[in-house]
Image (cartoon, helix red, strand yellow):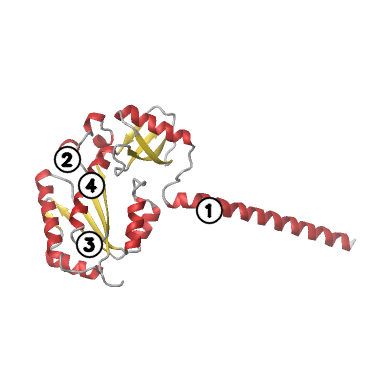
């Protein structure tokens, strides 16, 4: 009897062990499939191709042009979200919220995407004067009117028209540089932000929150690649940015929140080890 009981115990142990191993393998496989998606955004790439086709359709119906859908994901019960680009300019990446029944667009940030890209190009032209490589990302928050803009509100819209029409709320600029590249251009950089501030004052723009981050070239490239298909600063990006030594200031209608001497000191500190 004791031998039979021992055999049963062994069978149970083996069965439990095999079940645990199988469950572990399943968890590992799911982790490799799903974890990268979640790290790059809020529940990313969990929808079927039908949602991608639906997103393209409702955006085409609204704007009369074709769009690329990089990804779809959900943060609400009645709508899902998508990161999209117009086929006419894939450098513009914006978020759209779509009703889950496919009845239309809840809202989108196409207007912000167009204007943000315009400002990014202006920043890129300036930064390339001083740095061999860099990363720059502009975020705009335009409020209800901009998010619900109709097609005639966004065609070829400029920063000036955007400000006049939509009373934007907030703008943030992330800049990644190798802060050890040199320090012989601080005065020119600061003068550029003074010119930006003057432009803001004339146009009654929202404050610009500028953040500089000390990034090596590899991380700069990663960030640039990340925003070729992500509309927002999702988890992986914010974690990587948080690990960098940084400095922040504001450009408002009243002026720049730091003096040139403060900018120079902060910029020099940026290149030092934490």
Q: CA distance from mark 4 to mark 2?
A: 11 Å
Q: Residue furthest right?
A: 1
Q: Residues within 10 Å of mark 2 (few under 14, many from 20)?
A: some
Give the position of the C terminus as an image quadrant: bottom left
For residue 6, side relative to residue 175 (left or right):
right
Please state the horizontal and vertical placement of residue 78, each as a whole percent of the image: 43, 34
Q: CA distance from mark 3 to mark 4?
A: 27 Å
Query: Which residue is drawn at the image coordinates 16% and 45% (left, top)?
Result: 205
For residue 173, side relative to residue 226 (left or right):
left
Between disc 1 and disc 3, the foreground one is 3
Query: Which residue is drawn at the image coordinates 45% and 34% (left, top)?
Result: 51
Up-down: is 100 above or below 247? above
Query: In terms of sequence position, does the residue under pointer 4 or pointer 1 come before the other?
Result: 1
Circle 1 SS class: helix
Between disc 3 and disc 4, the foreground one is 3
Residue position marked by numbered label 3 in the rendering: 131
Between disc 4 and disc 1, the foreground one is 1
Query: In terms of sequence position, does the residue under pointer 4 or pointer 2 come before the other?
Result: 2
């Amino acid at each position: 009897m004791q031998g039979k009981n021992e055999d049963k115990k062994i069978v149970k142990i083996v069965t439990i062990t095999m079940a645990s191993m199988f469950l572990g393998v399943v968890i590992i496989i799911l982790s490799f499939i799903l974890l990268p998606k979640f790290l790059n955004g809020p529940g990313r790439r969990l929808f079927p191709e039908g949602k991608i086709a639906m997103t393209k359709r409702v955006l085409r119906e609204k704007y009369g042009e074709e769009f690329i859908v990089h990804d779809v994901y959900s943060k609400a019960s009645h709508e899902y979200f998508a990161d999209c680009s117009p086929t006419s300019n894939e450098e513009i990446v914006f978020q759209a919220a779509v009703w889950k029944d496919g009845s239309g667009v809840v809202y989108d940030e196409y207007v912000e995407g167009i204007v943000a890209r315009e400002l990014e190009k202006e920043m890129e032209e300036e930064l390339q004067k001083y740095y061999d490589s860099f990363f720059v990302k502009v975020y705009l928050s335009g409020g209800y009117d901009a998010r619900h803009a109709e097609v005639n509100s966004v065609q070829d819209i400029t920063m000036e028209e955007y400000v006049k029409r939509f009373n934007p709320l907030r703008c943030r600029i992330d800049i990644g540089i190798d802060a050890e590249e040199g320090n012989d251009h601080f005065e020119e950089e600061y003068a550029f932000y003074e010119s930006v501030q003057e432009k803001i004052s004339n146009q009654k723009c929202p404050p610009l929150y500028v953040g500089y981050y000390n990034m090596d070239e590899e991380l700069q490239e990663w960030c640039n690649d990340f925003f070729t298909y992500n509309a927002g600063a999702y988890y992986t990006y914010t974690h990587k940015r948080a690990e960098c030594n940084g400095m922040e200031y504001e450009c408002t209608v009243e002026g720049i929140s730091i003096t040139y001497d403060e900018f120079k000191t902060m910029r020099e500190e940026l290149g030092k080890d934490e």
